[in-house]
Image: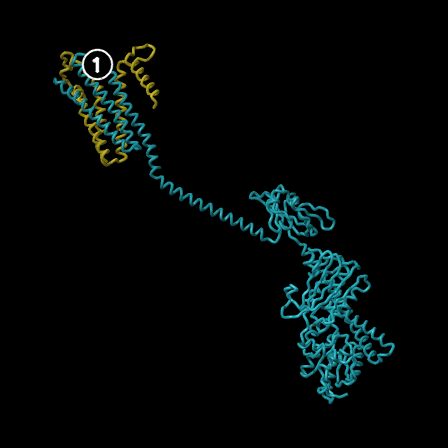
Amino acid sequence: MTISWVPVELTDSIGSILALYLAVACLIQARLWFKNKHDDIFRHYIILLTTAITIFAASRSIGHLVKQVLLLSGQNHIWQHLSPFSGGINTATFIAICTIGIYYQSVEKIHRQIEYYHHHLEDMVTRRTAALEDEITERKQIQQSLSEEKEQLAVTLRSIGDGVITTDTAGQVVLINKVAEQLTVWRHEEAAGRSIIDIFKIVDAHDRTPLENPVTRVLSLSRIVAMANNTVLIAKDGAEYNIADSGAPIYGQDSNIIGVVLVFRDVTAEKRLHAEMMKNEKLESVGVLAGGIAHDFNNILMAIMGNLSLTRHILDSQDRVYPLIKAAEKAAIRAKDLAQQLLTFSRGGDPVRQTAAIGEVIRESADFALHGSQIKCQYRIPDDLWLVHIDKGQMSQVIQNLIINARQAMDDSGSISISCENITDLAAEKFPPLAADRKYIKISTTDSGPGIPAKSIAKIFDPYFTTKEMGNGLGLAITNSIIAKHEGFIRVASSPEETVFTIYLPVAEPRSNGQAGAQSTLPCYPDATAHGKILVMDDEEMIRQVTYTMLRLLGYQVVLAADGRKALKLYLEASQTDAPIDAMIMDLTVPGGMGGKEAAAEALRLDPAAKILVSSGYSNDPIITNYRQYGFCGSLIKPYKIMDLHKALTAIITPQSAATPN
Amino acid sequence: MSDRLKGKGIRCGLFVLGLLLYAEPALAVQHHGGAEGLISHQIGHILFTLGMAFLLFRVYQDRKRGAGWFEFKGFLWCIILWNIMTFTGHWLDELTSPASFTIVNQHPVAFTINNLQDALFYFTRLDHLLLLPALFFLLKALQKWGKA
């Protein structure tokens, strides 16, 4: 079958024109579309694809049209030359289209990934931010807990009462706590990184030889080591501390030693306290001994003084022996005071106060303390010095302590002045503890000694503080205590030229003045006009005898008993008769028998109206000080004189109450 | 791009074109005459077809829908078929006898169909019937994408 070739040529020609037109239209349309969005990879691809197709269409269409023209015009040989170019371009565009496709696939894949990241970036950032926040929170919590742990460790270290120093294995300081800083006088900033040997210098307390550093020992022995008791730490400023310490290795996670921790504490005070305790025990022993001696000595003095006072009473004052007896009595009184001091020292206690002029006490005490010394003492004591309510014995001890201290400070040469004055202007004294509603007298002792060092002045009233090699550190402490018990105050001012102790004592209340006045009106030698029956209970025979003599001389009837039980029996027997006992004088302490306290309690149980005086050599015994609480009507401090006895009995026995006239 | 570089590019392009136009056979290099041209062209068709087929596969795989995608798929189908058609046409061109053509003044005016191959050859010569719809579909797809 033969078919016309015209349809083929027509299709080829018209098709080529239309294909070229459509290809160009596609390219234009693609470019317009591409302009809207440059970053679209598919549009890029379409641009390349349409470009390639347009090139192909142009090459093919133009080629076909040219071919038709050349064939129709009989120029076939020209077409033979051009044909390979047209075909080659077409082939190249096919390959280019394929290549563009492959390229597009690769780029599109990357583009998709980029698009994915682009579109999910916010989510990713949000997720990552959340993760980071979690991470940061976790890190912060860890840091917080680490910080807290560190803080806790630091606070713990700071709070530890012991010194703590840690070092590395080279012995270089890593950490030093507050107490260690104070003891070594090395600040943490200075000490960190330095050798422990520089920071922690220790010597033997006895022979001062340097001791092996505990860090070195710990590192060599790899175990905990303790230091000897006699270790002394020498601080940077030269201060020395007795220390107790131990060193221990610090182990790391791999059980290797990574450092050493030293823990030490200042035992200086502990050692001092121990020494003080030892001293106290010694003092207590001495006190017991002194107390025992003083008690017996007091009883002997009672007999001596009693008999002396009786002798002086019997003798005519014009008798040539009379001054000798008086001098002996004065010496006995001084011995009594000494015994009282010994008793005070041995027993302590509240003062037994009486209203008195302190001037004489000061003179006697100072003279006594300066006896045998080259030191001159000047007194400025006005006659109108107000009376004070004092325990004469204790106040004498105060003055003696101050004067003895001054004497020792001046090496027995120089001068001391003691002045007394009434304080009329409290404000001028600038001494805050003084009560504005009370009156005071001021006693000042001034010595020309070298003065008290400034660093010691705040401690001089502390018990056991002393700058003297042989001192016990109790003198000024007792002085301060006695003044405080008298509601007074003491202060000190010192310079290299002089030291002034100033004592403020409250002035006696008006009633005290009255009592003092009453005392002064009492007769020196009572006549034998007293009435009454007195029971004297004392375990000492000589005291019973001298008291008996005194009482008889005063006009009393006397019954004697050696202990409380005997006294009670006699009291009961007498109460059954017409001559009951009007008053009893009971010794407080009866070794091996019923003492005054128990006997008085029993007597008062049997007869609540019983009048009892308590008698003792311990002037500061609580029963003597507060005798009313125990049912006694008054007290008598042994050794007492006839006048003391007379006053005490007169106060409790009125003539009307005395049952039996003499 | 600077003018200097542009000038260099133009000069290089003209030099390459000159080489192509006045190329003479040289024994020193491989000769690319004869069937090589056809084979190269056919390979080009195969690559073109594979390229478009893969793109079509991706379009279906990505389930592209919406404005323009139907037309784009039409373009791809048509261009693939066109490639097959022209590939077949080039192949049959070599097999078809010149005697089948009636030549007048060195110009074919008729074609004698003796068998199915001849008929298929005649049909493949009408390839614009597929190329034009393909380009039309591409244009419509681009227009719709442009509007979208």
x and y percentages locating residue A440 in the rendered image:
67, 69
Decide which of A275, A188 is in the foreground and name it.
A188
The quadrant the C terminus of chain A occupies is bottom right
The answer to whether residue A91 is left or right of residue A529 is: left
> Would you identify the image quadrant in which residue A627 lies?
bottom right
Decide which of A521, A574 is in the foreground and name it.
A521
Name of the residue lying farthest toward the bottom: A578
In the displayed structure, would residue A129 be above or below residue A101? below
The quadrant the N terminus of chain A occupies is top left
Q: Residue at x 79, y 80 (%)?
A: A525
x and y percentages locating residue B100 in the rendered image:
15, 15
Asked which colour scheme the image uses, the reply is by chain
> Would you identify the image quadrant in which residue A482 lies?
bottom right
Chain identifier of the residue bearing label 1 in the image: A
For badge 1, the amino acid type reads Trp
How would you rate the neighbour count of disc 1 (Cα within 10 Å): few for under 14, some for 14-19, many for 20 or more? Answer: some
Decide which of A372, A565 is in the foreground and name it.
A372
In the displayed structure, would residue A287 be above or below residue A100? below
Decide which of A254, A85 is in the foreground and name it.
A85
The answer to whether residue A565 is left or right of residue A79 is: right
Q: Which residue is mark 1?
A: A79
x and y percentages locating residue B39 in the rendered image:
27, 18
Q: Can residue B116 be seen?
A: no
Colour seen for chain B: yellow
Q: Which chain is cyan?
A: A
x and y percentages locating residue B49 in the rendered image:
25, 25
